[in-house]
Image (cartoon, rainbow, N blue to C red):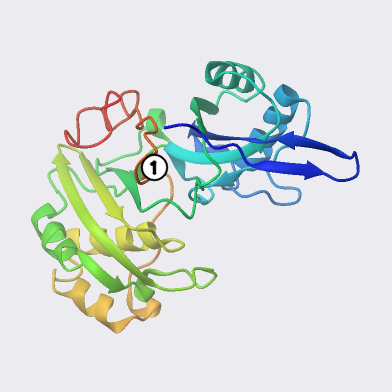
Amino acid sequence: MRRKRPFRRILFLGIATFMNRIAIGLHYDGSAFSGWQSQPHRNTVQDHLEDAIERFAGTRLLTTVAGRTDTGVHALGQVIHLDTELDRDKFSWVRGVNAFLPPSIALQWAEPVDDGFHARFLAYERMYYYALYTGPHRVPMIHSRAGYQMLPPGQRLDVDAMRAAAACLLGEHDFSAFRAAECQAKSPVKTMYDVTIRDDGNWVFLRFRASAFLHHMVRNLMGCLVAVGRGRYPAEWMAEVLAGRNRQKAAPTFMPDGLYLVDVKYPEPYQLPTADASASFFHGVFADGPDNGA
């Protein structure tokens, strides 16, 4: 497909210029950051990224993101777009911007797109993974990169009950019961396409696919699913919480450490690279999900 180039006139110079729109894929370890969104006097992913882009491009460029991750949340498949007059090949964008980023943030790819592309509003599906460690003690090597639910030796989460509880979430629902008070979404109605739970020894891995997610929605769902897995509530309780639309009736918000934004999907004709989860906890866990670039 031939890429359209939006025509924009710079009036104060009396000249015309063409702007290129670039889509960019990001990985980041969110444990050291106060979330994605730029905030005064806070350490955010967006600020680090835009600073690095400015050093590469020679001018400040604003970014638009697919999903604003919270403090401590990671990304294997975050997507942004930006507009620039700079005419560089896509590999130069990756190498050049990465040279100015801290080790915990990295561009994975850059692709030219037409001006109809929008990282947030054009996305029709988002996918999160959660890595939950259930061993009897903390493991320093996975600190801040996995959630914990420490269980005595020999005890396990009831994963079958968790799966039964998750079944009621599929389809279109009002997810107000799992929405943060400060959520700015216009509607609490979202469509959940899939909740998959894998049990692997001391690990439980969860995958959530939906049209979009409310603020803290996955972490609030995790809190409820873990409560069911611990036997504190029956599986049927999840449906009652969902129908009640009352955040106060649900379990507390679960920790952010094990949560990863893994994939964002866009309609044709945007054939953007898929997320690569091969260097993460999730390598080989979900055979039909982003893994090894598949």
Picture coordinates of residue 155, whole percent (x, y):
14, 48
Question: Height in image: 117 above or below 194?
Answer: above
Residue at 60% x, 47% y: name it: 34
Residue 47: percent from left, percent from top: 68, 40
Residue 210 located left or right of residue 156: right
253 or 107: which is nearer to us? 107
- The x, y position of residue 251, in whole percent, is 33, 69
Q: Residue at x 65, y 38 (%)?
A: 83
Who is closer to the viewer here, 77 or 181? 77
On-image quarter of the C terminus: top left
164 or 64: which is nearer to us? 64
The residue positioned 23% from the left and 37% from the top of the image is: 289
The answer to whether any part of residue 49 appears in the image is: yes
Give x and y (percent) for residue 28: 50, 33
Left or right: 29 as drawn, with respect to 33:
left
* Residue 15 versus residue 265 in the image, above or below: above
Would you name the residue on which mark 1 appears?
260
